[in-house]
Amino acid sequence: MENKKNNSGLKAAIVVLTMLLLGSVGYIYKLTADNKKQITLLTTEKASLEDDIKARIAELEIMSSENTALKSDINAQKEEMEKLLEELEKSKGDVAAMNRYKGEYFRLKKVMDNLVAENKLLKEQNVSLTTSLDSTNVALDENKKFTDTLLVQNNNLTKTIEKASKLAVLNLSVLALKERSSGKQIETTKARKANKLKVSFLIAENQIAKSGDRKYYVQIIDSKNNILGEKATIAMGESDQSLTYSFITTVKYENKSVQVNEDLSGEDFEAGTYFVNIFSPNGENVSKTSFVLK
């Protein structure tokens, strides 16, 4: 009877122990499964965080190349992101570490979001400034064209005034004369009889020309290409050219027509065609004619 009781107690103890063992095994299995699930979750979360950080670094690189005003701030933010990525890649990815890395990432992300917003504002301001500068340049170009047009008009007007203010020398003529001892002058066409040439010309009226003394150089060339009279040579105007003239006549000009008459005495005039030129002080030939002595 007593043996039966002992056997029953033993069986009961075995059953209890078996149940406890099975429970422990189940609990251990559950812990192992939960741990594997957590490891998988942490691994996925770590990879996702690494990808986010890499994307942010790439965005910062683009921003740094686009804008020099924020370059130092952008590069500093990029260095912090790269440092965080390096630490994350080296970590084992436990819960505490991941929480710390995520916290640091969100802090840096907030700073970066502010940089992105500021960068966008600066780009918009640059576009506005560029548009404003373009408008200003267009206005300056238009103003320059207008100024250039005025300069051309002024130059043309100046040239017109200069041209209009030039004195016209008209009716140039030469008479060969035989002057007697009594002073009486007789017109002749015979070279052997002539002993004086009378040069006459008219300076026309011009109200816009400057009044004052005007100097003219008269050049008379005979049929053998000899220059009569003084045969003096001077440089003309600003050029390197020179002029040999027969005589100089100075006229007092007061904006009214002036008749000029000058005599050139001579002897043994050659027969043939003579050429007469009148030059202004700047070397311009203002009138010319010719005559023939037989």
Image (spheres, rainbow, N blue to C red):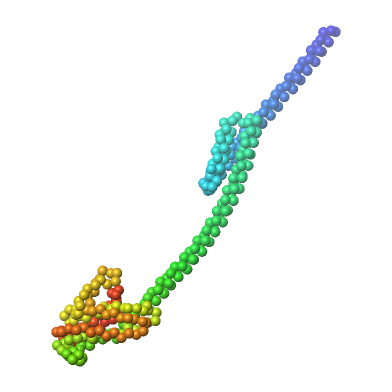
Q: Is residue 192 above or below residue 225?
A: below
Q: Residue at 50% across / 61% down in the picture?
A: 137
Of 88 and 237, which appears nearest the observer?
Answer: 237
> Quadrant of the image for the N terminus?
top right
Q: Does 38 sit left or right of 237 as displayed?
A: right
Provide residue 12's location: percent of width, then percent of height.
80, 15
Q: Does 62 sit left or right of 150 as displayed?
A: right
Quadrant location of residue 179? bottom left
Q: Residue at 37% across / 82% down in the picture?
A: 255
Quadrant location of residue 171? bottom left
State the residue lying farthest toward the right. Answer: 1
Quadrant location of residue 83? top right
Provide residue 81's location: percent of width, then percent of height.
57, 38
Query: Does residue 285 appear anywhere in the picture?
Result: no
Provide residue 76's location: percent of width, then percent of height.
55, 40
Of 102 and 229, which appears nearest the observer?
Answer: 229
Q: Does 211 sit left or right of 43 as displayed?
A: left
Q: Residue at 63% across / 31% down in the picture?
A: 97
State the residue lying farthest toward the front. Answer: 182
Q: Is residue 188 above or below residue 288?
A: below
Q: Is residue 18 above or below residue 59?
A: above
> Quadrant of the image for the C terminus?
bottom left
Provide residue 146's location: percent of width, then percent of height.
47, 68
Query: Does residue 253 appear anywhere in the picture?
Result: yes
State the residue lying farthest toward the top. Answer: 2
